[in-house]
Amino acid sequence: MRALALGSDAIVFVSRIWQTTCTAVRANDEGFVIDSPVFPDELEALPSVLEQAAFPVSGLLATHADWDHLLGRLAFPGASLGCAESTAARLQSELGGAQRALRQFDEENYVEGRTPLSLAAYQSLPAPGRLGLGPDHELEVHPAEGHTADGAAFLLPWLGVLVCGDYLSPVEIPMISEGGSLAAYLATLELLRELVGRAQTVVPGHGGPIAPARALDLLEQDATYLEALDREGPQAPLPEGRRTAAQRAIHERNVTQTKR
Ligand SMILES: [Zn+2]
């Protein structure tokens, strides 16, 4: 796992698998951890690394309900978990789904030593909405749907950081999962264009932090890909630099998922 400081009040952790990101932010005596790394040793390292850096953990946030972003409780079992209303609704309708997907991943990859993941209680946040952090700061919650049926992007204006969930990834093409939609994905990209304009750093769900110019570049590439996917289905060209076998497999699933 890599750890990258963004100024003095944000740290981004990048998992060894899928470059899944986890972002810790602080304001005075309060702090949030957004999303999670994946492997048990990465999750075990989080509390001590954050304690050494004097990053308090007042709560956890998740950008969406895909299991690889939901593992924060394994590192901070007592912490509250906040997510957008749409994500709360998905957690409610897919009870046990994240745990089953986690177990399957662990079995396929010979991962041992996992403690049980509890997602029994979570706080549903209105999106759009705001969440106070300390007396002086507010985190913005924006709806970000299309990759899945649920999701939020979190903007931290006092840090200039945008944590956008599974969009604008430098390593992964747009993925339309079950419940997701191409039209909603494109609409989210348009909303993100505005939010990127207010950020100095963008942290996508997969791949390290990027500068706004790079994020806007990826936004154009992703919109072009999705429009081609809509028109041409399987023939849609993949964005340059993201044409590996793994990305082609995602493309094939996108074709199935968007077939009418
Ligand atoms: Zn993801």
Image (cartoon, helix red, strand yellow):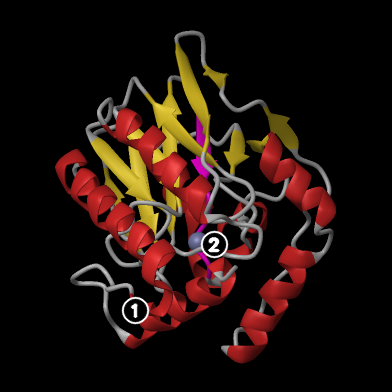
Q: Pointer 1: what residue?
A: 235
| Residue beneath the point at 48% across and 24% down | 140
Image coordinates of residue 20 in percent, x first then y, are: 43, 62
- Closer to the camera: disc 2 or disc 1? 1
Image coordinates of residue 159 in percent, x first then y, are: 31, 26
Left or right of 176 in this view: 174: left
User: In what quadrant of the picture does the C terminus appear?
Assistant: bottom right
| Residue beneath the point at 50% across and 55% down | 182
Residue 67 seen in the figure: yes
Q: Is residue 106 above or below residue 60?
A: below
Q: Nearer the viewer, residue 148 or 34?
A: 148
Image coordinates of residue 137 in percent, x first then y, are: 45, 14
Question: Residue flagged by tag 2: what amino acid is it?
Answer: Leu
Ligand 1 within 8 Å of disc 2? The answer is no
- Locate residue 40: give its quadrant: bottom right
Few, some or many residues within 10 Å of mark 1 (<14, 14–19, 20+)? few
Question: What mark, if any, has residue 162 been given in the picture?
Answer: none
Question: What mark, if any, has residue 43 been given in the picture?
Answer: 2
Circle 1 sits in a helix, a strand or a loop, which is it? helix
Sequence-wise, which precedes: disc 2 or disc 1?
2
Q: Which residues are magenta?
A: 31-38
Residue 214 drawn in magenta: no
Question: Residue flagged by tag 1: what amino acid is it?
Answer: Gln
Q: Is residue 29 above or below residue 113?
A: above
Q: Is residue 45 above or below residue 18?
A: above
Image coordinates of residue 185 in percent, x first then y, are: 47, 49
The answer to whether the residues at label 2 and label 1 have Cβ atoms under 8 Å apart is no
The number of numbered discs placed on residues in the rendered structure image is 2
